[in-house]
Amino acid sequence: MPKVPLAENSKQPSLRRVFSWGRAWEEAIRLALFGCALLSVLTTVSIICILTWQTIQFFRVEPEGRPHVTVTEFLTAPEWTPSNAPEQQHFGIRPLVIGTFMVAGIASLIGLPLGLASAVYLSEYASPRFRGFVKPTLEMLAGIPTVVYGYFALLFLTPFVLKPVFQGLLGFHVDTFNALAGGITVGIMILPMVSSLSEDVLRSVPRGLREAAYALGSTKFDVSVRVVLPAALSGILASCLLALSRAVGETMAVTIAVGQNATGSFNPLETTETMTAFIVDITGGETSVGTVQDYSLYAVAASLFLITLATNVVAQLILRRFREVYH
């Protein structure tokens, strides 16, 4: 059929977008969400820039009575005494790193196994009524202020538990401030995180895997250990690494329980100092701005940031290696 030409006065549909309040609202929401995401990125970049610049100043400033701190001295020197006379100042971060990882290691030995065991029990063995009571009770531990945990370690754990056991029965000397009390306290603090996150991951494992294992004659313990745990391994590792990062970065509890004397000792019954405890100590208001002691705060904070970043990178590599996807 021959094409009939359109009349000149026929109305063509307009291609222009018609304004509507709904479309404007959606665009406003999109911009607001973009602003929130951009704010987090800008905050992180700002923190990195501040830490980098102030750390550079730490290695550039020349204190009176001694040469400036070198990177080699900062990383390898066995002493950390920033508040002494200039000729007696030492800025070796190794004692702070030892104290930090000793407290975090003790906390991991206590919090991770107990948290994982409680998660397995709540997921596989506990009744719904018991689970509904115990899980909120465990999560309440995460809401207790860290200062309260610190005084709990100082006023109860050390004098009534550690000293009677290690000093009274075993004959070891126990300092009032010690790394073992701080590690136990931080282990109690990370236990709810490991338990809650791991229990959620275990319960998300498809029920068909459990039923298939039971059909083959497996016991509840076999199903829990050989089927459910391997299936939820990536999520469990994520919760453990997140708790480890929390243990490394804990501040007030370890400041009160562990002490503020960077001895660099590997004895958990002696006083030591963590990186976060030093940051709290140096910000007490007695340090002059622009001095090497003031800049040392940023150098320690930058080191802690790098340690946490390395932990997160390793965590991502491990999760990528063990991640399981079920359809």
Image (tube, rainbow, N blue to C red):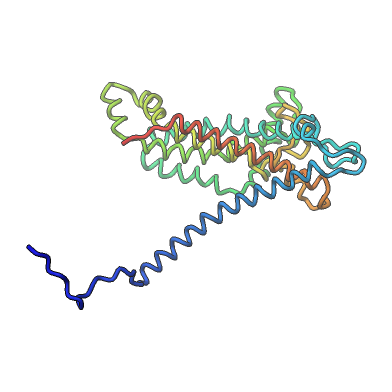
Q: Is residue 255 left or right of residue 287?
A: left
Q: Is residue 102 left or right of residue 175?
A: left
Quadrant the N terminus occupies: bottom left
Q: Position of residue 83 (x, y in %)?
A: 84, 42
Above/below status of 201 relative to 5: above
Q: Residue reaching furthest bottom?
A: 9
Q: Residue drawn at (37%, 67%), measured in percent from left and top?
A: 23
Q: Along the line of sight, which residue is nearer the eye, 130 or 245?
A: 245
Q: Splitting the image into 4 quarters, where does residue 275 fall?
A: top right
Can residue 97 be seen?
A: yes
Depicted 32 relative to depicted 277: above or below: below
Q: Residue at x 17, y 75 (%)?
A: 7
Q: Residue at x 39, y 32 (%)?
A: 324
Q: Residue at image x 92%, y 40%? A: 65
Q: Is residue 161 visible?
A: no
The image quadrant of residue 3 is: bottom left
- Of residues 118 and 78, the one drawn nearer to the viewer in this rendering: 78
- Foreground: 84 or 87? 87
